[in-house]
Image (cartoon, rainbow, N blue to C red):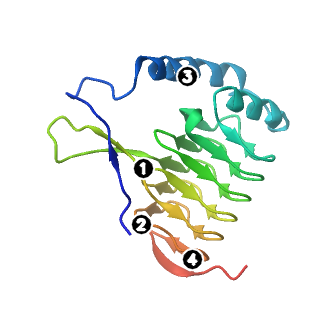
């Protein structure tokens, strides 16, 4: 199933698709996270979750977010109990990113909810949510495109480029990611 991308209204290539309020929120966030959380050790996870909540992230239970994780527009992030965002992982939340219970986003993974409409000369922004279901694991330096769902207990191999939804319990790897087995756990 092909993801449904939402094309944002942009009259030209130089106009932001975001409202002034949203742009101010983005600007404020770009300073708050590094100053209040970027330097924090792992045991200060509760503090990082508090800051994320203050900026509109939806936090359920006790997920883990590494201090060096990079999160764009945290108000589009949903974290469930024991979800984990690793060291230097990128949650590029131009649209919703939903991380369900016990899923793991390993170090330097890039969850990218945005792209552009290359059929139009001014390349307007297009976004679609990313959903990582319960117990899924995304290996180091994998890249997940907009509109992708990673099924429950699926495994994405390190360095993989995920261009299509991943079925529950499937192991995928490569560029583009292809099924290489099933997760029996």
Mark 3 lies on a secondary structure that is helix
Identify the residue position indicated by label 4 in the image. Answer: 170
Mark 1 lies on a secondary structure that is loop
Name the residue: 58% across, 22% down.
Answer: 29
Q: Quadrant of the N terminus?
A: bottom left
Q: Earlier in the sequence, mark 4 or mark 1?
A: 1
Identify the residue position indicated by label 2 in the image. Answer: 164
Q: Earlier in the sequence, mark 3 or mark 2?
A: 3
Name the residue: 67% across, 19% down.
Answer: 35
Task: Please state the horizontal and vertical placement of residue 114, each as a whole percent of the image.
Answer: 39, 44
Instruction: Decide which of 99, 35 is in the foreground and name it.
Output: 99
Q: Dot 2 surroundings within 10 Å: few (below 14), some, or many (20 or more)?
A: some
Q: Earlier in the sequence, mark 3 or mark 1?
A: 3
Asked whether disc 4 touches disc 2, contact meaning CB atoms under 8 Å apart, the reply is no
Where 102 sits versus 59, above or below?
Answer: below
Please state which of the two labelled residues, at mark 3 or mark 1, is closer to the viewer.
1
Q: Earlier in the sequence, mark 4 or mark 3?
A: 3
Distance between the Cα atoms at labels 3 and 1?
Answer: 22 Å
Instruction: Decide which of 163, 6 is in the foreground and name it.
Output: 6
Identify the residue position indicated by label 1 in the image. Answer: 128
Q: Where, by quadrant of the figure, is residue 151 drawn?
A: bottom right
Q: How many marks?
A: 4
Distance between the Cα atoms at labels 4 and 3?
Answer: 36 Å
Q: Dot 4 surroundings within 10 Å: few (below 14), some, or many (20 or more)?
A: many
Q: Dot 3 surroundings within 10 Å: few (below 14), some, or many (20 or more)?
A: some
Task: Please state the horizontal and vertical placement of residue 72, each as a whole percent of the image.
Answer: 53, 34
Distance between the Cα atoms at labels 2 and 1?
Answer: 13 Å
Name the residue: 59% across, 44% down.
Answer: 89
Identify the residue position indicated by label 3 in the image. Answer: 30
Where 131 sits versus 67, above or below?
Answer: below
Instruction: Decide which of 159, 35 is in the foreground and name it.
Output: 35
Q: Earlier in the sequence, mark 2 or mark 1?
A: 1
């Amino acid at each position: 199933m092909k993801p449904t991308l939402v094309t944002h209204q942009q009259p030209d290539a130089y106009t932001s698709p975001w409202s002034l309020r949203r742009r101010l929120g983005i600007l404020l966030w770009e300073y708050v996270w590094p100053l209040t959380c970027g330097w924090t050790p792992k045991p200060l996870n509760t503090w990082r979750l508090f800051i994320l909540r203050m900026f509109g992230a939806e936090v359920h239970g006790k997920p883990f977010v590494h201090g060096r994780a990079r999160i764009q527009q945290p108000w589009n992030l949903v974290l469930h109990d024991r979800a984990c965002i690793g060291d230097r992982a990128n949650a590029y939340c131009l649209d919703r990113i939903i991380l369900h219970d016990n899923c793991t986003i390993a170090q330097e993974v890039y969850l990218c909810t945005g792209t552009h409409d290359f059929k139009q000369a001014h390349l307007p922004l297009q976004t679609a949510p990313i959903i990582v279901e319960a117990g899924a694991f995304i290996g180091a330096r994998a890249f997940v495109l907009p509109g992708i769902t990673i099924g429950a207990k699926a495994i994405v191999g390190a360095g993989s480029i995920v261009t299509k939804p991943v079925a529950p319990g499937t192991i995928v790897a490569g560029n583009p990611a292809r099924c290489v087995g099933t997760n029996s756990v």
